[in-house]
Image (spheres, rainbow, N blue to C red):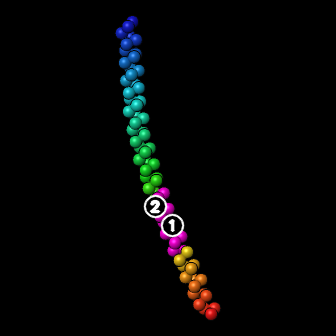
Amino acid sequence: MATHSTDRIFEAISRIERHEAMCEERSKTIFNRLDNIEDSLNDIRKTLMAGAAILICGMASLIVALLFLLK
């Protein structure tokens, strides 16, 4: 009888260890994906900032050109 309960304990420990290994692998995968998403968002932010700067400079140059034409 003691052998049966000991076997069950070792089986439970083994299952827990396998579960921990699977969770660790999933966590690594999730963190890698989050890092990739963060990099993509940073790239998008840089592109938007560059586009906004170009748009603002273009609008400013248009205003200056119109002011010189009106004089």
Q: Residue furthest bottom?
A: 71
List x then y, in percent, for residue 64.
57, 85
Under mark 1, the amino acid is: Met
Q: Position of residue 3 (x, y in %)?
A: 36, 9
Helix, strand or loop at mark 2:
helix
- In the image, the segment drawn in magenta is 41-55
Q: How far apart are the two marked residues, 1 and 2, measured between alpha carbons?
A: 10 Å
Q: Nearer the viewer, residue 19 or 52?
A: 52
**Front in this rendered view, residue 9 or 64:** 64
Judging from the image, what secondary structure is the residue with disc 1 in? helix
Q: Is residue 69 above or below residue 36?
A: below
Q: Residues within 10 Å of mark 2 (few under 14, many from 20)?
A: few
Q: Quadrant of the C terminus?
A: bottom right
Q: Residue at x 46, y 53 (%)?
A: 38
Residue 13 highlighted magenta (yes or no): no
Q: Main secondary structure of the magenta part?
A: helix
In the picture, the quarter occupied by the N terminus is top left
Identify which residue is drawn at 38% across, 20% down.
11
Circle on res. 43: 2
Query: What residue is pinned by disc 1?
Result: 49
Check residue 46 for magenta coloring: yes
Q: Residue 45: where, in percent of width, then height?
A: 50, 62
> CB under 8 Å between callouts 1 and 2?
no
Residue shown at the point (38%, 11%) measured from the top left: 4
- Residue 5 sits above or below residue 46 on the image: above
Q: Which one is nearer the viewer's eye here, 2 or 67?
A: 67
Q: Considering only vertical position in the picture, is 56 above or below 24?
A: below
